[in-house]
């Protein structure tokens, strides 16, 4: 098959958030004279990725790939994940070449993360000049830029699909609830999203206090962050990720807060019609939790004691029996050896090495998968189908040879190489080691092909029936993909409308 020629560019969409604009929300960039040379990706946001400091504060750029020909083309916007802490639009896996080859204008962008983008200092004394949700303000301004300018690149601003995975998927769900982006997109695909990774200012302080402890700072020292070397301020992040579950089991790492940009929890806003008319594809992978549940430095509860404490702290002690009864019947309650990642990582696409050994207990992996990913995704789908018939759910269940051998199974992010059609990246090669090209191509055609058809026509696949409630058709992505009926009524009964860390 011949490859179509595409062009690639990176364009600033906001003023550099440096100097006096550090910890300030994104501001529109002033127009420039002449031709802006935007042939390369811009730098990623400041981050520490697996021990390596990288990125720049001057990071707010947009990347566009498009077919060499065509006008008024469908637009596909990808929002990268990474726990609101790591990741970048310029990760090779996220190259949109195949989307452009298939006739879409592919757009991605960088946004501020972690301390500079999502740590909320606004309620501490003396921090009146800090602003909340700086990272969300970046995302809003990027979406506005796309809406106002994409027609100059051959894109149709009235036919925009947004897509993201992990924190990017959570951002997609957030955008269904953010008033400032209403009308900027018509379709949404949320992969492995965490819809409840949003908190109040008061809950945010639970994690920010841990950060200050790790940095050896007090509340009075917070203003020093405005002048601190940006990589110096990252030193406290590891401590937060390692201990947050032991202080508050089930709490999410720092992310968006409820404020004027995001006035309400996304699920509640969607229930009220905030995204009326937006077509939606949403769901999860079968074993999301294998990336996060570990015997030490865990990312979610790893014992019945932690599960019980999580429920008790959130006034759900009465639910302890039914939750444990639902997840307990496994013979693998105890942690058993399998090869995987040596400790919790916030990276959406971690480096993979086969010699990593880890211990896992499947009830807690299932608990984390349902609590953080599957159960709230079903709630989002159920909320949105009241305002549009066009809601679809899927579940990625393909356990590759590597997945069985290493214990990762069908884990978080394992479908990404297929949605991008990118098998050259190191992560892709690990996940699909020793698999046949025929099997890989079938899955690429199924997932990537569905995303492209959805962006073009609003329907991912004639064989993929729409979501109809807790007992509903769901598209299963596997070696032989199919639409089957999944009855998740009991799952949703167990979780009911329990809420966690909302006060």
Image (cartoon, grey):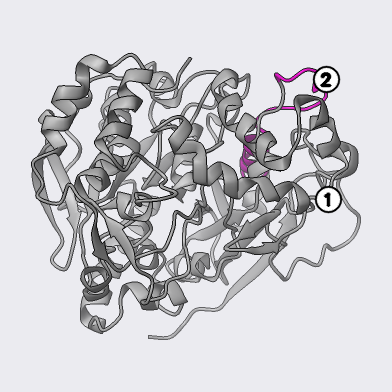
Q: Is residue 135 magenta?
A: yes
Q: Is residue 354 magenta?
A: no
Which SS class for mark 1?
A: loop
Please identify the quarter of the rendering in which residue 49 is found: bottom right
Residue 263 coordinates in the image, percent (x, y)? 55, 18
- Left or right: 424 in relation to 489: right
Which SS class for mark 2?
A: loop
- The answer, for residue 72, to whether it is visible in the render is yes
Pick the residue in front: 359 or 465: 359
Residue 332 coordinates in the image, percent (x, y)? 15, 51
The residue that appears at 83% across and 24% down in the rendered structure is 129
Residue beneath disc 1:
229
Residue beneath disc 2:
126
First in sequence: mark 2 vs mark 1: 2
Pick the residue in front: 393 or 414: 414
Label at residue 94: none
| Relative height, residue 355 to residue 411 (above, below) | below
| Relative height, residue 408 to residue 499 (above, below) | below
Please identify the quarter of the rendering in which residue 437 is found: bottom left
- The answer, for residue 112, to whether it is visible in the render is no
Q: Which residues are magenta?
A: 123-146
Residue 43 coordinates in the image, percent (x, y)? 72, 62
User: For the residue carrying disc 2, how many other residues have a C-alpha within 10 Å: few (<14), some (14-19), or many (20+)?
Assistant: some
Which image quadrant: the N terminus? bottom left
């Amino acid at each position: 098959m011949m490859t179509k020629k595409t062009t690639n560019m990176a364009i600033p969409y906001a003023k550099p958030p440096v100097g006096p604009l550090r910890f300030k929300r994104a501001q529109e960039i002033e127009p420039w004279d002449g031709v802006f040379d935007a042939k390369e990706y811009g730098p990623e946001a400041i981050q520490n990725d697996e021990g390596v400091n990288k990125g720049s504060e001057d990071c707010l750029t947009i990347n566009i790939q498009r077919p060499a020909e065509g006008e008024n083309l469908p637009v596909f916007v990808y929002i990268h994940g990474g726990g609101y802490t790591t990741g970048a639009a310029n990760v090779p896996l996220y190259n949109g070449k195949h989307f452009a080859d298939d006739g879409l204008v592919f757009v991605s962008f960088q946004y501020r993360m972690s301390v500079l983008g999502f740590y909320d200092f606004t309620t501490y004394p003396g921090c009146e000049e800090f602003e909340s949700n700086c990272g969300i303000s970046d995302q809003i301004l990027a979406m506005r830029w796309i809406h106002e300018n994409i027609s100059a690149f051959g894109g149709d601003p009235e036919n925009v699909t947004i897509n993201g995975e992990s924190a990017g998927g959570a951002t997609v769900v957030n955008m269904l609830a953010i008033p400032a982006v209403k009308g900027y997109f018509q379709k949404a695909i949320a992969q492995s999203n965490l819809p409840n990774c949003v908190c109040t200012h008061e809950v945010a302080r639970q994690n920010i206090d841990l950060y200050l402890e790790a940095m050896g700072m007090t509340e009075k020292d917070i203003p020093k962050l405005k002048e601190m070397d940006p990589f110096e301020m990252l030193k406290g992040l590891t401590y937060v990720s390692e201990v947050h579950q032991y202080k508050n089991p089930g709490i999410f790492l720092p992310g968006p807060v409820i404020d004027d940009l995001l006035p309400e929890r996304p699920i509640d806003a969607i229930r009220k019609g905030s995204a009326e008319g937006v077509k939606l594809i949403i769901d999860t992978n079968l074993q999301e939790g294998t990336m996060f549940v570990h015997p030490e430095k865990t990312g979610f509860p790893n014992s019945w004691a932690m599960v019980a404490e999580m429920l008790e702290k959130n006034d759900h002690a009465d639910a302890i029996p039914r939750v444990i009864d639902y997840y307990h019947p496994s013979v693998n309650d105890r942690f058993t050896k399998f090869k995987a990642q040596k400790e919790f990582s916030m990276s959406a696409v971690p480096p993979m090495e086969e010699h990593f050994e880890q211990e896992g207990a499947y009830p807690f992996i299932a608990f984390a998968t349902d609590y953080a990913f599957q159960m709230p995704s079903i709630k989002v789908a159920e909320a949105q189908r009241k305002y549009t018939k066009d809601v679809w759910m899927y579940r990625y269940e393909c356990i590759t040879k590597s997945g069985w051998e290493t214990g990762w199974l069908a884990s978080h992010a394992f479908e990404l190489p297929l949605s991008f059609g990118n098998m050259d990246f190191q992560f892709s090669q690990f996940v699909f080691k020793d698999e046949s090209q025929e099997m890989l191509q079938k899955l690429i055609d199924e997932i990537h092909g569905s995303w492209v058809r959805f962006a073009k026509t609003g329907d991912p696949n004639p064989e993929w029936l729409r979501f109809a409630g807790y007992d509903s058709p769901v598209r299963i992505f596997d070696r032989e993909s199919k639409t089957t009926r999944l009855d998740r009524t009991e799952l949703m009964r167990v979780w009911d409308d329990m809420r966690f860390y909302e006060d």
